[in-house]
Each structure stands twice: as C-alpha cells, then as structure tokens.
Image (cartoon, rainbow, N blue to C red):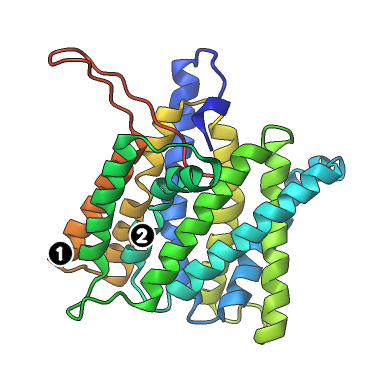
C-alpha cells in the first residue's frame, strides 16, 4: 500500500508506539504462517488448507464487522472479488511451494514482493524505477541464487512457486492501492478473505477430498492460520496503519522473513547452509534498499529517508 495514501497529520508518540507494536505483532504472525502451513500440509491437501484458512477467517472477521458487510456496495464487492482471487492464487502458489522447499526459503523469497512492486509498476504503468530499486533488485537476485541454487545450478519447483506467489502478491499490492481510495478498506479486506476461501473450497471439491481437521496438530495449524495470521493479521494491519508512518510500516514488515527463519529454527530445527544464510541476508538487504530512499546532496549533510508500506 503506497505511503501517499496515509494521513499527513501529526501522530501522537503514544498512539504511534502502540500502532508500531501492533504492526510488529502482525508481522510476527505473518512470519509464523509459513511454519503453520507446513504443519497443515501434513493433514490437508493444498486447496483444502487454503479454503479452511480463509473461510474461517472470513466468518470470524465478518461476525465482528457484519454491519460493514451488510452496507457494502457493488463496487466494494467487485474489488473484493478481484483481490480475493489474487489472494487465492498467491496463497495456492505458496502452499504448493512449501511442499518442496523450506520454511526459511519461503519467507525470504516471498519478501521479494516488495522488490516486484516497482518492477511491475514500470512494466504496466510506465512508472520508471529509481536507481535504488534497480540496485536492490540486483542484490536480491544474487541473494536468490545463493539461497536456492543447488550443486547442479538449478532451483527446485517449490522455490519457483514461492517466487510466483511473490509476483502475484505484488500485483495485489498495486490493485489494493488503487481500490482502497474509493471504498472502505476494512470491508474490502474482509471480503477478500471470503472470496479466497470460496475459491479454495471450489477447487478442493473439484480436485481433492475436502475435510475438517481430525487431529490436534491439524486444528492448531488451521486456527493459527485463520485467527492469528489472517483475521487478526489483516484487521490489525488496517487499524495500525492509520496511526503510524510509512517509514515505520516498511521497516517493521521487512522483519517478516526473519521471523519465518526464527520460527523454523526454534520449532522444526531448520538450519540453512552458510551460503543460504548469506543469500537470505542479501535478499533482506535488497528489499530494504528497494524500500528506503536516501537523499544525500554532498558528504557531511544529513540525509532523509522514506519508505512505502508494502503489505496489504
């Protein structure tokens, strides 16, 4: 979501501090989602997992904000359908990808969505990317190579799917920026959860045998994904971003892949090779460079920086 849409009025320090804390919790939840998806794939097929995650999240969020849903207009529904369809595509790609790659890889590769946004804007909207973005992309590409290439200099199908998911997510970020200018953002966010869940349920009935959780581990993974990572995550982001700055938003969201790697290490003892950690660091550096704008007219002067928020 572009930083230009944020309020220009001064922010109270206490209010902004609380908002930044909420954003940090949301980022932590999103970082844990890769681990919970990996857990869920032990009990569910891919579309079934997507259907349960977003279906339950929609029911919970919809019950909380039912008045907004009742009063929505056709434009909101249409926009929600488009965003929900993109959400289904990107989460399907990530869920299938996690079958063939690690949690840490998924977290760092998906963070590339921040880099893909200016690239897609340049392709489809003729918005020329800045030099910092091009430089950040170059560093990120080197990081991808170190993180994913094996001894045969090939990337596995799971990593490709995660990168595809990041590209679709970048599209969703762009469309969300366009759509939220004319409709209620919370209603739009809730509606996209329902659309993604509906697509997941349809595809699950067509290609799988959908079922509800039958073990405690399956229930933990589904409820964590639905409540923490989806319902609270999306609503918490919408509320917090009204009371903090784009700079803080972008910086906090950059921690998502770090949380993903941390949870993978803590709970499933996932460790990357040395070159993998070097690659992960380079991807994170590339993402940060693509987000930050440094202005330094000449040596010794102070510089200003700004970041565009990158989450939807």
In the image shown, does 61 or 131 lie closer to the viewer?
131
Per the rendering, the mark at residue 109 is 2
Above or below: residue 127 compared with residue 210: above
Residue 54 shows in this picture: yes
Marks 2,1: beta carbons within 8 A: no
In the image shown, does 215 or 221 lie closer to the viewer?
221
**Residue 7: x, y in percent?**
57, 20
Q: Which quadrant, please, contains the C terminus?
A: top right
Residue located 31% across and 52% down the image: 258
Instruction: Identify residue for label 1.
Output: 275
Per the rendering, the mark at residue 126 is none
Which comes sooner in the sequence, label 2 or label 1?
2
In this picture, residue 43 sits left or right of residue 286? right
Above or below: residue 185 compared with residue 293: below
**Residue 188: x, y in percent?**
71, 44
Above or below: residue 246 compared with residue 68: above
Residue located 43% across and 66% down the image: 162
Which image quadrant is residue 213 in?
bottom right
**Residue 38: x, y in percent?**
44, 72
Q: In terms of secondary structure, where does tag 1 sit?
A: helix
């Amino acid at each position: 979501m572009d930083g230009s849409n944020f309020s220009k009025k001064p922010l109270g320090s206490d209010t902004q501090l609380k908002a930044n804390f909420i954003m940090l919790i949301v980022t932590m939840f999103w970082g844990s989602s890769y681990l919970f998806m990996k857990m869920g794939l032990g009990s569910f097929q891919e579309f079934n997992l997507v259907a349960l995650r977003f279906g339950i999240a929609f029911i919970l969020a919809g019950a909380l904000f039912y008045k907004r849903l009742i009063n929505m207009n056709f434009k909101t529904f249409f926009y929600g359908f488009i965003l929900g369809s993109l959400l289904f595509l990107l989460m399907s790609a990530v869920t299938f990808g996690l079958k063939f790659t690690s949690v840490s890889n998924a977290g760092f590769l998906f963070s590339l969505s921040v880099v893909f946004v200016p690239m897609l804007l340049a392709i489809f909207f003729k918005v020329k990317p800045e030099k910092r973005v091009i430089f950040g992309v170059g560093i990120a590409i080197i990081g991808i190579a170190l993180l994913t290439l094996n001894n045969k200099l090939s990337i596995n199908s799971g990593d490709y799917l995660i990168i595809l998911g990041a590209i679709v997510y970048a599209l969703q970020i762009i469309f969300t920026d366009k759509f939220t200018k004319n409709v209620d953002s919370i209603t739009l966010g809730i509606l996209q959860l329902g659309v993604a869940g509906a697509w997941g349920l349809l595809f699950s009935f067509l290609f799988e045998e959908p079922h509800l959780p039958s073990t405690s581990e399956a229930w933990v993974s589904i409820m964590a994904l639905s409540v923490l990572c989806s319902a609270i995550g999306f609503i918490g982001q919408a509320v917090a971003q009204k009371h903090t700055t784009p700079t803080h938003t972008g910086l906090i969201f950059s921690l998502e892949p770090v949380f993903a790697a941390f949870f993978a290490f803590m709970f499933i003892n996932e460790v990357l090779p040395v070159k993998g950690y070097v690659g992960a660091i380079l991807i994170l550096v590339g993402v940060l460079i693509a987000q930050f704008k440094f202005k330094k007219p000449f040596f010794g002067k102070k510089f200003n920086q700004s970041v565009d928020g990158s989450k939807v």
